[in-house]
Image: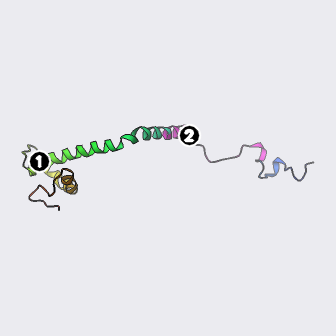
């Protein structure tokens, strides 16, 4: 006979699971998910110190591309001006930031005033 202070395993008390089963917890993450999280952490560890350098390199490439597309408007002959004319409306949105970064106080284009 059991005492009132020692519950039997079959009564479903909070002290233990029924029938000796292991308690159920949240679903375990798979090995692939844990490996992906570890990989993401390593990527962040190695990339974080160079994030500013990567952003500057990307901005420099964008500035060069913008100058090549707008070269005809800036007075530099461009043999591909016919093809790059389609890209001008896309570049007008960020033109003000570009000419400020290049050190120009006012817009260098006669037919486009942004400030």
Rendered residue at 86%/49% (across/down): 6
Q: Nearer the viewer, mark 1 or mark 2?
A: 1
Q: How is the image coloured?
A: rainbow
The numbered mark at residue 7 is none
90 relative to 46, above or below: below
Rendered residue at 87%/52% (across/down): 5
Q: Within the image, what quadrant is residue 77 found in?
A: top left
* Residue 87, image x, y percentages: 17, 51
Rendered residue at 56%/40% (across/down): 30
Residue range (magenta): 17-37
Q: Decide which of 88, 47 is in the foreground and name it.
A: 47
* Residue 69, image x, y percentages: 15, 48
Q: Decide which of 106, 89 is in the foreground and name it.
A: 106
Q: Furthest-right residue in view?
A: 1
Q: Within the image, what quadrant is residue 93 found in?
A: bottom left
Q: Earlier in the sequence, mark 1 or mark 2?
A: 2
Q: Is residue 106 magenta?
A: no
Circle 1 Cα neighbour tier, 10 Å, few/some/many (<14 / 14–19 / ≥20): some
Are discs 1 and 2 less than 8 Å apart at CB? no
Q: Is residue 65 left or right of residue 33?
A: left
Q: Within the image, what quadrant is residue 111 found in?
A: bottom left
Circle 2 Cα neighbour tier, 10 Å, few/some/many (<14 / 14–19 / ≥20): few
The numbered mark at residue 30 is 2
Q: Is residue 23 left or right of residue 27?
A: right
* Residue 51, image x, y percentages: 36, 43
The residue tagged with tag 1: helix, strand or loop? Answer: helix
Residue receiving disc 1: 71
State the CA–CA distance, disc 1 to disc 2.
54 Å
Rendered residue at 77%/43% (across/down): 20
The residue tagged with tag 2: helix, strand or loop? Answer: loop
Q: Is residue 20 magenta?
A: yes
């Amino acid at each position: 006979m059991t005492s009132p202070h020692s519950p039997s395993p079959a009564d479903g008390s909070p002290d233990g699971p029924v029938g000796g089963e292991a308690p159920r917890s949240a679903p375990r993450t798979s090995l692939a998910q844990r490996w992906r999280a570890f990989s993401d952490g390593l990527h962040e560890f190695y990339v974080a110190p160079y994030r500013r350098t990567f952003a500057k390199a990307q901005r420099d490439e964008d500035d060069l591309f913008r100058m090549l597309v707008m070269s005809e408007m800036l007075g530099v002959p461009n043999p591909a001006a016919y093809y790059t004319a389609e890209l001008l409306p896309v570049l007008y949105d960020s033109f003000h930031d570009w000419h400020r970064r290049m050190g120009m106080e006012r817009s260098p284009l006669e037919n486009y005033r942004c400030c």
